[in-house]
Amino acid sequence: MASVGFRYGMGTVLAIVGALSMILNFFLFFVCVRRSRLRKPPHYFLMSLALVDIIAVVGWSSLTVVSLFSDGWILPTEICKVQEYIMSMYLYLNSHTFVLLAFERFLLFLRPSKHSEIFINSVVLIMMLALWLFDGVMSAFPYFGWGTVSYFSSQFQCAMDHEKNIRETNFVTVMCFGIPISLCLGLYLFIFIMIRKIKRREDDNGALIVERNNRAIGDSYSQRLKNQQLKFQNAGTKAVKPNIGKKFTYTEDGYVSNDSSDDENTESNVQKGTPKQVVRQKKVYHMAKNDSLLMKTYVFMTILFFLLWLPYLIVTYIFLKNRYADISDEIVFVVVFLCQCTTFIKPVVYVTYNTHFRKHVVKCFCRKSSSNEIKSDTGERGFDNTALD
């Protein structure tokens, strides 16, 4: 049994960490909602992480603090099951959201034109709703008869009793650690390789080119459909033979024409109201410093999250091999404490490391003139027509 001093000391520290986590996550959520430049579809995932952190503090960490000060579980059994459910859902949502963040950065550096088509409001909201529903159902498996929930005095919390269902433990390990870590590692490694290749491609101004999109005519499906309609609007009509003069050239379609006849035909077409053919323009996407900085922020958040959860995973499998392993209650709770600190570490990393976010914090609380606001926002854009951060 843990000593009274240890319980009171760790209870006080965990209460402080929980309070700071609530403040920082609410602050992060508030700034993302307040600033229109941050209220973009890719940032919805960060807002989702902040929301699940707040829920975890209320329904997970706070109940552990109560157990520390009362030296045992004094709440109803239903609350014990709620704590385990929130703990499991917190782990599932964070692990899978980090995979989506890695995929979003991967697509941004691989094909920014496709990124702007996929990561829009409706698609991202569907992703988030599907993720919350999927992880919420998987977290409820113990209530469907797969696994049991118990209170562990060494952890001062209610958790899955892994000794009674090893298959459930292996399933959670694969879904929350094996697959997410493998996917994040592969995607970020590929991104770093792409960045090295991108640094070799520069335009005349020295900007790094990510993609040259030859298909982007009007940036939208409706514009491409309109151009396709213009292409076939005169199908079946008799072609007008050009008036050949002394000076003539061959057009792209193989017809022979001269400059004077082309000019006359162009003017007559405009007068008759014939739609003007849209010229296919090449669109160039450049790499922005803010996008690279946000990618590195995601990498640090992902690494710290899984590193803080790794000791808990190791201790769990040690007890699976030997339930009488010689591990003191103090060490076991420190392992649990590290897991609960992830609700505080993620916003700290994002706020302190991401200088771009701190600029928006200053703009959020410091009133500036609208001209300076527009000027600064325009200067922060990275990819053409895809300013994400």
Image (tube, rainbow, N blue to C red):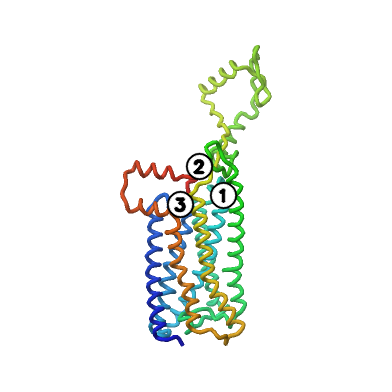
| Residue shown at 46% from the left, 80% from the top | 157
- Quarter-of-image position of residue 54: bottom left
Amino acid of disc 2 = Asp
Mark number, residue 109: 1
Amino acid of disc 1 = Phe
In the drawing, does residue 83 fall left or right of residue 178?
left
Q: Which residue is mark 3?
A: 40
Residues at badges 2 and 3 in contact (C-beta under 8 Å)? no
Measuring from the top left, give residue 64's x and y in whole percent. 43, 78
| Residue shown at 52% from the left, 53% from the top | 123
Residues at badges 1 and 3 in contact (C-beta under 8 Å)? no
Q: Nearer the N terminus, badge 1 or badge 2?
A: 1
Visible residue check, residue 86:
no
Measuring from the top left, give residue 375's x and y in whole percent. 39, 41
Q: Which residue is mark 2?
A: 384
Q: Nearer the N terminus, badge 2 or badge 3?
A: 3
| Residue shown at 51% from the left, 44% from the top | 383
